[in-house]
Amino acid sequence: MCETPGTAGEDGVCATSLESLVDFSVLKLGKNVQVLSTQLALVGSHASLPSKVYWQSVLPNTPMPKAVQDSLSSDETKKQEYRITGVHRINANKGVVCHKQNYAYAVFYCHEIHDAGTYMVPLVSSDGTKVNAIAACHTDASVANAFKVLKVKPGTVPICHFLASDTLLWAPNYSMYEKRL
């Protein structure tokens, strides 16, 4: 993705450092932001990264997401069926999404999103594993290929998908919801 042009109307950047990831997101949304990612509902403690100092100096009231903390590890939740136990709208009409790229070091492709509904979707698997998943629903042409595959016209129905656990959603802090698993 870093070598291809972004979607029309959406600025994007390949962030090769924590500083550039934070700076791009703050430039687009301001400092009063929240950072969300799909993650296990019960997450243990994680060792601090040296970059955490920079994060806290720029965004002192925003905890560093697990996806950033673990950006160099590849622990994945095993694949299994999940049941949706709720849907909570994140009331933001704009945001920044950062997708971890497959490089030898931490690289995120970050881009703006406009007019995409975003949601926190609690999931429970058959073995009891709980996951808070982030979902995005698009009604515009930014996912044009999905509209073609599903044989629907942009603007008629939303195309929704879950964000991977190594993908970050930055949203204005006023959109924060309270309910958790």
Image (cartoon, rainbow, N blue to C red):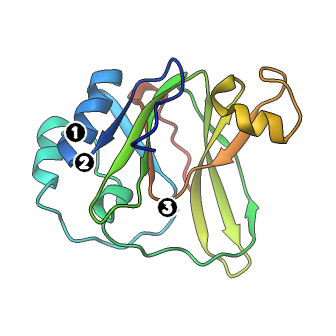
Closer to us: mark 1 or mark 3? Answer: 1
* Rendered location of residue 108, percent (x, y): 36, 48
Q: Of callouts 1 and 3, which one flags the residue occurring earlier in the amino acid sequence? A: 1
Binning the other alpha carbons within 10 Å of mark 2 as few (below 14), some (14 to 19) or many (20 upward) gives some
Amino acid type shown at disc 2: Thr
Task: Report the residue at 58% width, 63% height from top.
Answer: 131
Using residue 96 as the reference point, say whether residue 114 is left or right of it: right
As measured in the structure, the alpha-carbon distance from the residue carrying label 1 to the one carrying label 2 is 7 Å
Residue 121 in view in this figure: yes
* Rendered location of residue 54, percent (x, y): 12, 46
* Residue that carries the numbered disc 1 in the rendered image: 20
Q: Quadrant of residue 119?
A: top right
Closer to us: mark 1 or mark 2? Answer: 2
* Residue that carries the numbered disc 2 in the rendered image: 16
Is disc 1 in contact with disc 2, using a CB cutoff of under 8 Å?
yes
Closer to us: mark 3 or mark 2? Answer: 2
Q: Tell which of 148 and 159 is nearer to you.
A: 148
In the picture as drawn, the residue positioned furthest to the bottom comes out as 127
As measured in the structure, the alpha-carbon distance from the residue carrying label 3 to the one carrying label 2 is 23 Å
Amino acid type shown at disc 1: Ser
Q: Tell which of 149 and 85 is nearer to you.
A: 149
As measured in the structure, the alpha-carbon distance from the residue carrying label 1 to the one carrying label 3 is 23 Å
**Relative height, residue 89 to residue 126 (above, below):** above
Is disc 3 in contact with disc 2, using a CB cutoff of under 8 Å?
no
Q: Of callouts 3 and 2, which one flags the residue occurring earlier in the amino acid sequence? A: 2
